[in-house]
Amino acid sequence: MKVICASCRAEGRPGDLGEKAPFDNPTETHGYCPRHAALLLASLPSLSFPDIELLIVVRRHDVALFEYLQRRLEGVRGVKVILERRKGDRRHDLRQRAPDRRRLRRRLRLGQASSLGYTVVRFRPR
């Protein structure tokens, strides 16, 4: 089956995403290209932060920037500042590594990284 992005096709682009099984079937099926998938996810409200429109994630070791942004943005409606909790890849043992079975990224939304040490993630307003 041929996989196409219907959103790209509606914009006048080819939207070809490749093929999937069964390969002898010439019909088309639909999926999302990475750009339209990101736009779709950005249009959804956050389940973790239901009242937040703008989430600012500060690098875990930059506590001074976190405290500064938290003070400056305190009281601004729809904005939340948090420290990044990730410590890195937990799979650090190189011996007897099993194949990676994860199929999806853990982060659904990709934010806009700033050179100042934070990432901005936008959510749809409720």
Image (cartoon, helix red, strand yellow):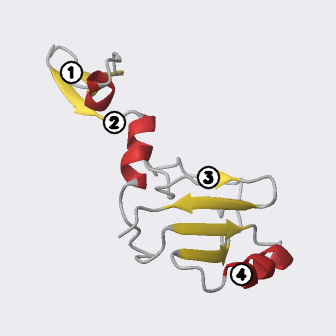
Q: Position of residue 60 (x, y in %)?
A: 76, 72
Q: Position of residue 88 (x, y in %)?
A: 70, 62
Judging from the image, what secondary structure is the residue with disc 2 in?
loop
Per the image, the residue denoted by label 2 is 32
Query: Horizontally, is 76 left or right of 126 in the view?
Result: right
Marks 1,3: beta carbons within 8 A: no
Label 1 to label 2: alpha-carbon separation? 15 Å
**Foreground: disc 4 or disc 3:** 4
Q: Amino acid at mark 2?
A: Tyr
Going from N to C along the chain, the mark reached first, 1 or 2, is 1
Per the image, the residue denoted by label 3 is 97
Q: Amino acid at mark 3?
A: Arg
Q: Position of residue 100 (x, y in %)?
A: 52, 49
**Foreground: disc 1 or disc 3:** 1
Identity of the residue furthest to the front in this view: 76
* Camera-nearest residue between 91 and 50: 50
Judging from the image, what secondary structure is the residue with disc 4 in?
helix
Marks 4,3: beta carbons within 8 A: no
Query: Horizontally, is 110 left or right of 93 in the view?
Result: left
Q: Amino acid at mark 1?
A: Met
**Foreground: disc 3 or disc 2:** 2
**Residue 1: numbered disc:** 1
| Mark 3 Cα-neighbour bin, 10 Å: few <14, some 14–19, many ≥20 | few
Residue shown at the point (43%, 54%) measured from the top left: 42
Residue shown at the point (82%, 78%) measured from the top left: 63
**Foreground: disc 1 or disc 2:** 2
| Mark 1 Cα-neighbour bin, 10 Å: few <14, some 14–19, many ≥20 | some
Label 4 to label 1: alpha-carbon separation? 50 Å
Q: Position of residue 104 (x, y in %)?
A: 44, 50
Per the image, the residue denoted by label 4 is 70
| Mark 4 Cα-neighbour bin, 10 Å: few <14, some 14–19, many ≥20 | some
